[in-house]
Amino acid sequence: MAPQTTNPADLLDNAAAMVHFLAECAPCFAVGSQNIGLSDEGSFGLILILRDIEGTLKEVSNLL
């Protein structure tokens, strides 16, 4: 388990790392995505959204 912190920059960095992990795993999820009705384009869009969130979190973290 990761050490707990209350530093806002650390919290944002941790959130960015989690989003990065999800974006990296998204292609694996896409393989089974047809089972839940998500198209290839939809799963690619999910990857782009996650990357955008990751970038935003990193930018805000750098401002703190």
Image (cartoon, rainbow, N blue to C red):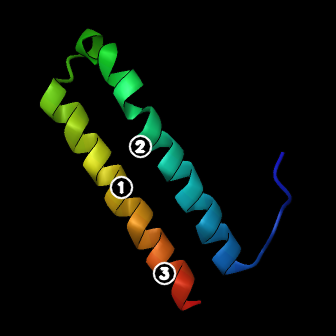
- Residue 27 relative to residue 12: left or right: left
Mark 3: give few (<14), some (14-19) or many (20+) Cα within 10 Å: few
- Quick one: label 1 or label 2, which is nearer the N terminus? 2
Identify which residue, 37 or 44, lies in the foreground: 44
Spatial separation of the CA atoms under disc 1 and disc 3: 14 Å
Amino acid of disc 2: Ala
Q: In which quarter of the image is residue 24?
A: top left
- Quick one: label 2 or label 3, which is nearer the N terminus? 2
Circles 1, 2 touching at the beta carbon (< 8 Å): yes
Q: Please give the label number shown on residue 60.
A: 3
Q: Name the residue under label 1.
A: 51
- Quadrant (top left, top right, bottom left, bottom right) of the C terminus: bottom right
Residue depicted at x 58% and y 55%: 17
Q: Please give the label number shown on residue 26.
A: none
Q: Please give the label number shown on residue 23.
A: 2
Amino acid of disc 3: Val
- Quick one: label 1 or label 3, which is nearer the N terminus? 1
Amino acid of disc 1: Arg
Q: Is residue 58 above or below residue 23?
A: below
Residue depicted at x 40% and y 67%: 55
Circles 1, 3 touching at the beta carbon (< 8 Å): no
Spatial separation of the CA atoms under disc 1 and disc 2: 6 Å
Residue 56: horizontal and vertical position, in percent? 40, 71
Residue depicted at x 24% and y 32%: 43
Circles 2, 3 touching at the beta carbon (< 8 Å): no
